[in-house]
Image: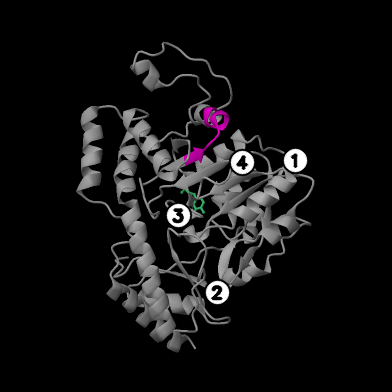
Amino acid sequence: MNWRIPLSDIDFGPEEADAVQSVITSRWLTMGAITQEFEQAFAAYTGAHYALGVANATAALHMACLALGLGPGDEVIVPSLTFVATANAVRYVGATPIFADVCGTNNFNISPLSIENALSPRTRAIIVVHYAGYPVDMPRVLEIARRHDLLVIEDNAHGVGASLEARQLGTWGEIGCFSFFSNKNMTTGEGGMLTTDSPELFEKLRALRSHGMTTLTWDRHKGHAWSYDVTELGYNYRIDEIRAALGLAQLKKLERNNARRRALTGTYRVALQALTPEISLPFEQHPGTSSCHILPALLPPNWDRISVMEALKAQGIQTSIHYPPIHTFSAYQKPGRGADLPVTEEIASREITLPLYPAMKDEDVLSVVQALQTSLVRSL
Ligand SMILES: Cc1ncc(COP(=O)(O)O)c(C=O)c1O
C-alpha cells in the first residue's frame, strides 16, 4: 500500500550509500574493522564500557539470558505489553517469563509495584522494556533487584539515545539490548547491539556471538592466530560489515533525529489537545529524555478502534497497535497460572500508534490529527 503518511520511515541518504559502497570496495564483508569502529563509537556514545554488534535485538536478548546463566527453573519478570521477543528470549534458555503489569494509562512501562508482586523464590532476573523510549523507573527497579539479588536486562530496542538522570538507557542494568530493525530510530535493516560494563560478561557475550570460538576469522586474517578452540556452545549471531557501516552512518544522525521526534511528539500533544481532547497521549511530564520511538495514543474506552484505523487508512494514514499483550498469545497459554494484568489489558484494548518519523512535517501531524478528528466523529 502506498501510504500518504506511513507509520515510520527511514532516514537514508548518500551517507549510507557511500558507507555500503566503501565496504563493498574493501572486499571484507563480515566482522572486521568497520564492526569494531561501530562498536567503539556506540560504546562511546552510550557511555557503556563495552558494546558488541549482533544480528538483531532478539539474538541480543537471547545472549543476555545465556551470559547471565538463566535457565530451567528460573523465573524472569517481564512486561506483557511489549514485542514477543522480550519473553521469547527467556523461553529460549528454558527459563519461565512471569508477566508484570504496567504502571498506568500515563505510563506504559513495567510497574515496580507489580514487579514486587511477581517475585517468588525462583525469580532470578527482570527484563525491563523502555516503552517507546520513555525511561523505566530504573532507580526503583535497581533497588528491588539489589534487595532480592536479581539481575537486570534492559530491552532497549526502542530507546537508543534516550536517558534518565543523564545516564543513557541500556547502561543501567547488567546488559543492554538494542535493535536496529528497519523501523527503529537508527537502522541497519536487521541488526542489534549489546552493551555492558562488565569485562567478564563482555567476554562471554563475545564467545556466544561466534560459536564459542576463541579466535575469529578476522584475527586469523590479520595474522594474529592460526587456529582456535571452542570452549562452549555458541551461535552465529554476528553483524556484518555492511550493516556496521550503515550503523555508523545512522549513529551520526541519531541525536538530530531523536530531537526531531521529540519536537513532533510535542506538536502532536498540542494538536490532539486542541482538536481531539478525548484522545490522551501517555508519558506526559515523564522523567528523563525519551527517544520518542513511536507515538502511542489512547482512544477513549469503548471507541471502535478498528473503524478509526480503517478511516485513517482510507486517507492514506498508516497506524498500528503496540502491543497485543504477550500473555494473550496462544503460544503463551499456560494451564493453571493465568496472568492478572488489568492495566496492560486496558491499554492494549485502547492503544493506537500514530505515524512518527524524523522527516515528518508539522503539517503531516496536523493532517493525522484532523483525520483522527473526522474519523472519531464517524465512529461514534
Ligand atoms: C521491545 C522490543 N524488543 C525486541 C525487539 C526485537 O528486535 P529485533 O527485530 O532487532 O530482533 C523489538 C523489535 O521490534 C522490540 O520492539
* Nearer the camera: disc 3 or disc 1: 3
Q: Does the CB distance between marks 4 and 3 fall below 8 Å?
A: no
Q: Which residues are magenta?
A: 194-203
Gap between marks 1 and 2 measured at Cα: 35 Å
User: In the rendered image, which quarter is residue 102 located in?
Assistant: bottom right
Label ID, residue 92: 4
Gap between marks 1 and 4 measured at Cα: 13 Å
* Nearer the camera: disc 1 or disc 4: 1
Of pointers 4 and 2, the one earlier in the residue sequence: 4
Gap between marks 3 and 1 measured at Cα: 34 Å
Q: Which residue is mark 3?
A: 162
Gap between marks 4 and 2 measured at Cα: 31 Å
Give the percent coordinates (x, y) of residue 91. 64, 44
Q: Residues within 10 Å of mark 1 (few under 14, many from 20)?
A: few
* Nearer the camera: disc 4 or disc 3: 3
Label ID, residue 73: 1
Q: Nearer the viewer, residue 276 or 143?
A: 143
Give the percent coordinates (x, y) of residue 39. 40, 36
